[in-house]
Image (cartoon, helix red, strand yellow):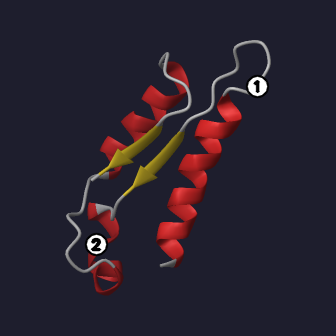
Amino acid sequence: MKRALVIGGNGTFAKAAAFELPRGIRLNSVSPNLFVESAEKYKDFFIGFNPIPVEKVANTFIQSALGIETAQNFKIY
């Protein structure tokens, strides 16, 4: 439940605040899932989740920072 509140809060904040920023500054959020690289250690906390590679998350952060989108929540599952 706490994870859902944090993810929902971050995504909602990005959507609401992005349009208030001056000079065309963009704001996005990235919500990754369980990483392949740490799946063994945290698998008990993420039952039923499909692990994703950290490289995919890094590419999404790059897309978020350098792309043209704003007020987006990039979910990576």
29, above or below 27, in the image: below
Q: Position of residue 57 (x, y in %)?
A: 38, 45
Q: Name the residue at the bottom extreme.
A: 44
Direction from residue 55 to residue 1 in the image, left or right: right
Residue where numbered disc 1 is placed: 21
Mark 1: secondary structure: loop
Which label's residue is closer to the chain start, 2 or 1? 1
Q: Residue at x 64, y 46 (%)?
A: 13
Residue where numbered disc 2 is placed: 39
Q: Name the residue at the top extreme.
A: 23
Instruction: Kindly indicate the quadrant of the structure image that contains residue 48.
Output: bottom left
Q: Position of residue 15 (x, y in %)?
A: 59, 38
Direction from residue 69 to residue 36 in the image, left or right: left
Direction from residue 29 to residue 43 in the image, left or right: left
The front one of 65 and 18 is: 18
User: Which amino acid type is shown beneath numbered disc 2?
Assistant: Ala
Instruction: Kindly indicate the quadrant of the structure image that contains residue 51.
Output: bottom left
Q: Residue at x 52, y 58 (%)?
A: 8
User: Which amino acid type is shown beneath numbered disc 1?
Assistant: Leu
Q: Position of residue 25 (x, y in %)?
A: 70, 20
Q: Residue at x 48, y 45 (%)?
A: 30
Q: Residue at x 56, y 31 (%)?
A: 71
Instruction: Kindly indicate the quadrant of the structure image that contains residue 50.
Output: bottom left
Near mark 1 (Cα within 10 A), the count class, few <14, some 14-19 or many ≥20, is few
